[in-house]
Image: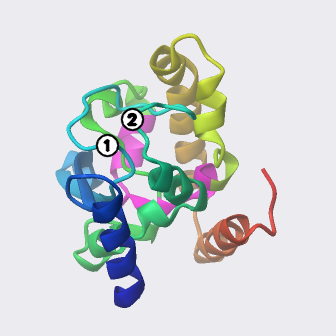
Amino acid sequence: MSPFLLVIGLCIRRGSPGPAIFRQTRIGRHGKPFTLYKFRTMHSGQAGSSVTAEGDSRITPLGARLRATKVDELPQLLNVLTGQMSLVGPRPEVPEYVYRWPAKERHLILSSKPGITDPVTYQLRAEETLLAGRDDPETFYIQEVLPWKARSYAAYLSRRSLTQDLVTLFRTLGALLGSERR
């Protein structure tokens, strides 16, 4: 995949100034912070909310395509190779939101290694669209989406199995390839 990733990185650099890779602190297993890698999909140096709604002016044209296809997530394979993440597990969250999870769910979620995908990932594939229709996307995320995610992550972890993780991988691939619709 290296040649493909290199081409994507070069296209990002050519399309807008700044690094091709976006780095962000996320919280991993046992509450340990780590640096998550993604392809940069926004204009470099623009501050704003950690929540991104569809149509956000910070998103570059190429970034919109990378987000739609989830290709922006591929650099997280480096996080998997370094042992910070697994292929399947609850998505790692930014520190400011982890501490808003209910304590019971937070403890369970942080007992597991975070993953690139999980059942919530394909259930909320259109999260940016969901947030776009809100007056205050961040407040909606904190009050509605984040607690739902925490409950869903906890439910997934309480019945997790190798079979379920394989099904999750295949469903995620199906969603990315368009065989599963939103």
Q: Quadrant of residue 161?
A: bottom right
Query: Neighbour class for label 1 at 10 Å: few (<14), some, many (≥20)?
Result: some
For the point 33% across and 66% down, the residue is 85
Verify CB contact (< 8 Å) between mark 1 and mark 2: yes
Residue 137: x, y in percent? Answer: 52, 20
Mark carried by residue 58: 2
Q: Which residue is mark 1?
A: 43
Magenta-tinted stretch? 105-121
For the point 65% across and 69% down, the residue is 164
Residue toward you, 164 or 117: 117
Dot 2 falls on a residue whose secondary structure is loop
Question: Where is 15 relative to 25, above or below?
Answer: below
Residue toward you, 51 or 27: 51
Task: Using the rendered image of the protein, determine whether residue 116 is visible from the camera's viewpoint.
Answer: yes
Q: Is residue 111 magenta?
A: yes
Residue 178: x, y in percent? Answer: 76, 67
The three-letter code of the residue at mark 2 reads: Arg
The three-letter code of the residue at mark 1 reads: His
Query: Neighbour class for label 2 at 10 Å: few (<14), some, many (≥20)?
Result: some
Task: Using the rendered image of the protein, determine whether residue 90 is visible from the camera's viewpoint.
Answer: no
Question: Where is 179 relative to 182, above or below?
Answer: below
Dot 1 falls on a residue whose secondary structure is loop
Q: For the residues marked 1 and 2, what is the alpha-carbon distance in whole angstroms? A: 6 Å
Q: Is residue 132 magenta?
A: no
